[in-house]
Image (tube, coloured by chain):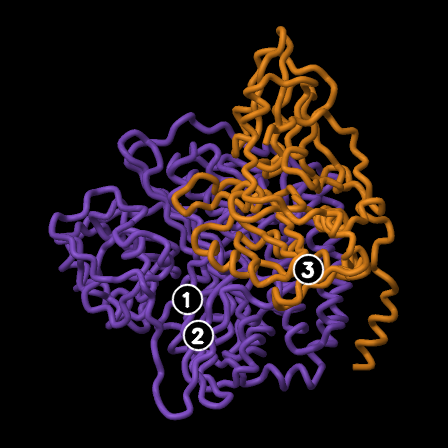
Chain colours: A purple, B orange
Amino acid sequence: MKIERIEMSLSELHEKLPHTLGKNSENRLGLLTSIDGGQLATLLLNPKDGTAGLLVSPLENNSYRSFTPQLAQFHWFERALFDFFGIVADGHPRFKHLLLHDQYEGDFFPLRKIALPANFQNVLPRRYEFFEVKGEGVYELPVGPIHAGVIEPGHFRFSCFGETIVNLEIRLGWVHRGVEKRLTEVPWQKAHFVAEAAASDTACANAFAHAIAIESILEVKVSERAQYLRTIALEIERLAMHVIDVGGIGTDIGLLGISSAMGRLRGKALALADLISGSRFLRGFIFPGGVRPVSERKLSEIKAGVIGLRKDLAPVIQILSENQMATERMKDIGRLSRSLAQEFGMVGILARACGIEYDSRQCFEQGKFPELAPPITTELGGDILARTRVRIGEIATTLDTIEKLLDGCPHGEDKITLPASLPANATGLGIVEATRGELIHLIFTDEAGKICRYSIKDPSFENWTAISIAIRENLIADFPLCNKSMALSYSGNDL
Amino acid sequence: MLKLISYLLNQGIATNRNICPDLAEGVRGLPKLTDIPCSTGCTACVDVCPTDAISVFKIEETGHIKLDLGLCIGCGYCVDACPTGTIANNPSTRVAVSRREDLVLTTASAPPGNIAQDATSVMVSAPDSLEKAKWFSRSVAARVVATGCSACDMELGAAGNPIFDMERFGVQIVASPRFADALIVTGPISKGMQAALSSCYGAMASPRIVIALGTCAISGGVHRGGYADANGIEELLPVNVYIPGCPPHPWSIIHGLLLAMGKEHLAPRSVARFSTVRIEK
């Protein structure tokens, strides 16, 4: 999508942001990063009119006054900015490493391209100090990085008083693979494979955002058929993930019948993915310029599959919703307030579950959205029950949307031919509502038309803080269920 | 609760009795090599491959291909690009092997030395013999260390669902390395997870089986060679079974587990094999 690039000095930025991003403003922070280490690049989104602006502010002395004390949503962005560029946020209340661990050299800043200033003093030791809660009877419980089940790695440091959680600090970065750097190293025609590997449970959304960003740099538009097929694929991915996430709630409550039924039905949703793309994870389906060809016969099989799945899901969801034990287990646990969710810029299901009406499918161009976007599903509770209800609501709207898209899918070309090279000094932006929320891919090219900076903001990046907030004052035994109800991505966050 | 039980009873048995069947038509598996000669001088497959898994070479004016499934992410671009049909889609889900070199396929019966040597296989030490693995042929407790993008983990989770039901073969996922027989590793094991993985392996009692699940775990996949050292398991731990795929199909995962348990007779490799590259150790 189109993006307006504005050069702005740091002092102007400091003046502007508190107004633009303050309480009750229309705008939200897309991401904060740098291009080569010499500037701040702030992406501002206006969901109301579907526009985006990039503020580029040159840095002096490799540092800036931290935005976090005024605008909480900056807190992880500023820490990541130091990890990757060595840019210092003066006055950040908890300034420490985010994703790079002790194995890396002290002054190793992988995405920085310009030299460090001669007088650079590294303000942060690699050693990570956890926030410590002191007092009689308070103890720490470390969990991870390897978890008990089959899930991605992360470290949770609980400070507890009895069975009550006083504080939870989450340390991630265990699966940092250097995806953003790799995306600047491979030829851009092959970059979509790497973009998909950012988080493969949302491979389709990542490929989609990548394609939108590249196409916006090239200023081309793909065929109407490709737009429809891309949107169908995105919704199939959402369907499969929502089904397994609702099943996961069943697992953590102890309703194993629900989880095994949902596991089986996810298989049916993945069969739809197999039909449209030949891959259960929709890998390689969306690429800049179009999609892989799909026959009409397959589309009608998908239609039949969607109708069947709707019928199959109904009794399972009904049994879960009517189960008093399940409802009591979820109600009032892991509550996130609307004001804190807003302050931290949270997105996706957990934001919609506390009444924030933001779904980027309604705002930013992505395939056939916002034209055919389903209505936003919201709940007010902010607890596990509300999040589960939003998921269940979205399963229904997603099924509707897939059917509507299948009915409208026109004949035509699957892909268009793209130019051999990207234009110089261009900026491209792709925003997609992935299963977990707003996903952003932001691409910069250099004078030679080569991708020089590729920035990904996974929805989980903002949302991880939500778990720490929601689990406070709850029992430690409720953590697994609360964690499952958020169902965040480790790999998308760590990149 | 009675409603749930009656619903489940009404659903009947979902489990597939046919073990490791071929993929449905139109579904992408890993590529395979056929005996159709390669057109000399064509590099279409090499040009489209995102992970440099393919190389072409000539022996006496005949074109040949070397394909490393340990690097392949199964995108299928080479299958689409191949003008002769030398590279084709392999619908089989029985793709797990116990030697790294068995993942390297070639159309040449006697490949020249440089081709034979460049396959990467640097074993830190010999793995516990799979003969010992037969001790676990009725039951294996597996510990999973996930270090990747979560696709392999989700497929491993799917392998435990009622359709595939790996528990019927005696496979159980356990919550501690202390009572695990097998270590299943997914993902490219970048710097952040290397220490955790090695301490997990160290906490397991011998004999222990190591299973590399997915292309990233085998070679690093698309992440190979980056600053995060995400190059797969080979220089870190000795491996017993390799399950290629990005991610491997749940049936392929079950195939790999059967292989590790010495029960591959339940799902023997059915594909006509091409001569593999032997690596001098």
Number of the front mark, 3 or 1 = 3
* Mark 1 belongs to chain: A
Disc on res. A171: 1
Callouts 2 and 3 in the same chain: no
Q: Which mark is residue A334?
A: none
Amino acid, disc 1 = Arg
**Dot placed on the residue nearer the N-terminal end, 2 or 1:** 2
Q: Position of residue B21 (x, y in %)?
A: 81, 44
Q: Quadrant of residue B3?
A: bottom right
Q: Distance between the Cα atoms at labels 2 and 3?
A: 29 Å
Judge left or right: residue A428 versus residue B139: left
Identify the residue at horizontal 54%, vertical 20% (top origin): B114
* Dot 2 and dot 3 residues touching (CB under 8 Å): no
Q: Tell me where residue B253 appears, x and y as whole percent.
A: 70, 49
The answer to whether residue B221 is left or right of residue A161 is right
Q: Is residue A90 left or right of residue A416?
A: left
Is residue A304 visible in the rendered structure shown here? no
Q: Kindly identify which residue carries mark 2.
A: A157
Q: Relative to residue A260, is residue A6 depicted above or below?
A: above
Between A413 and A76, the one lying in front of the other is A76
Residue type, mark 3 in image = Asp
